[in-house]
Structure formats: structure tokens, C-alpha cells
Amino acid sequence: MANLYLLRHAKSDWADVRLSDHDRPLTERGRKNAVRMGRLFAKLGIAPELVVCSTAARARETLERAMDAGQLRWSVQFEPALYMASVETIVSVVRSDAGDCTSALLVGHNPGFHSAALELIKTGEPELVHALDYKYPTGTFADIEFEERRLADIGLSTGCLKRFIKPKDQTMA
């Protein structure tokens, strides 16, 4: 079985209008939520073979803070194509960059992550699927499991949504 983990970047800061969208940092809430999620990953034993992260500042900062908080030592590569990627691009990145892996974490953006998660799943706990269908908030983590052994072989409408966790859903500081 293969697992694809999707982490939407945490809440970003719009205060400095001089910054390009690509260069926006996290807000204080975003920084705290990234730390929460990193501690949660450590608690859950999330251990992707590869992490592929958007090059946007807010995605990189989310990943850095999560890894530091959880004391996670993951193999990371940065992929410009994940910045504001479409479903097709996200699936292509999974198949090409993480194709030989059985598990990978992607860190990126909406609306692509929301759409990709919806299009990749076929099944899952009804309340999780409903929550995903409704909204994919900043800092939220999805765990999609596939029957295929390698991520290169996954297809649309074949995954099972195993977890859908928002930062506010768990109470770790």
C-alpha cells in the first residue's frame, strides 16, 4: 500500500503589500499551527520516504517549523511546480518525483490541494470525506492510502481518505 500525505501551508501573512505572493511568510497563528502539526506528525509516526515542498516562503516555513517541532529528519526536495499547482501537476509531481516511493508528503497550496485530494479519493470515513468536501483549511493534513505499492501507479478516484486533520482539531501546543 502507498500513502500520499498532503499538507497545506499554514496561515500566511498579507500585511506587507510589497511582497510578492510567492514570498509571503506565515502569521503568528500559522507559525503556531505548523508547530502543532509537526508535533502531531511525530506522535502519529508519520515518516514519508520523501517530502516534496513548494518553493513559496509560506510552504517552506510551514515545513521547517513542523520538522523542527517534531524533531523530524525527512528527506526534502523543493519543487517550483507545486506553487499554485493544478490537480494534473500535483499528480504528475507525485508520479515523477516520488514515483518509486511508497509514501510521500507534499507541502503546497489551495485550490490545487483541495481539488487533488477530492479527485484522488474514492472512499473514506463519511465524516472525513464530508469535512474534506466542505473545506481544506490552512495547515490541514490529509492522508490518502492507495492499494498500489508505488506512488507512480496511483490514479484518480482510487484512494481512501484515512485522516483529515486540521490544526484546530488537535490540542497539542
Image (cartoon, grey):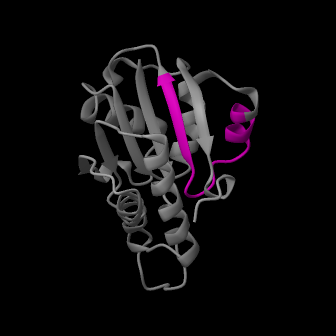
The one of 28 and 158 positioned closer to us in this rendering: 28
Q: Looking at the picture, how far across and down is residue 135, in whole percent?
A: 69, 47
The one of 96 and 76 positioned closer to us in this rendering: 76
> Does residue 41 sit above or below 29 in this rendering?
above
Q: Quadrant of the N terminus?
A: top left
- Residue shown at 45% from the left, 56% from the top: 38
Q: Quadrant of residue 101?
A: top left
Q: Looking at the picture, how far across and down is residue 80, in whole percent?
A: 30, 53
Q: Which residues are magenta?
A: 128-145
* Number of numbered discs: 0
> Does residue 126 sit above or below 40 in this rendering?
above
- Residue shown at 44% from the left, 74% from the top: 25
Residue 139 lies in the magenta stretch: yes
Q: Is residue 171 left or right of residue 100?
A: right
Q: Is residue 117 left or right of residue 50?
A: right
> Does residue 45 sit above or below 140 in this rendering?
above
Q: Which residue in the rendered view is the most extreme toward the front?
A: 43
Q: Quadrant of the C terminus?
A: bottom right
Residue 95 lies in the magenta stretch: no
- Residue shown at 35% from the left, 63% from the top: 68
- Residue shown at 57% from the left, 39% from the top: 115
Q: Quadrant of residue 58?
A: bottom left
Q: Is residue 100 left or right of residue 87?
A: left
Q: Looking at the picture, how far across and down is residue 136, in whole percent?
A: 63, 48
Q: Is residue 102 left or right of residue 164?
A: left
The one of 124 and 70 positioned closer to us in this rendering: 70
Q: Looking at the picture, how far across and down is residue 7, in whole percent?
A: 48, 48
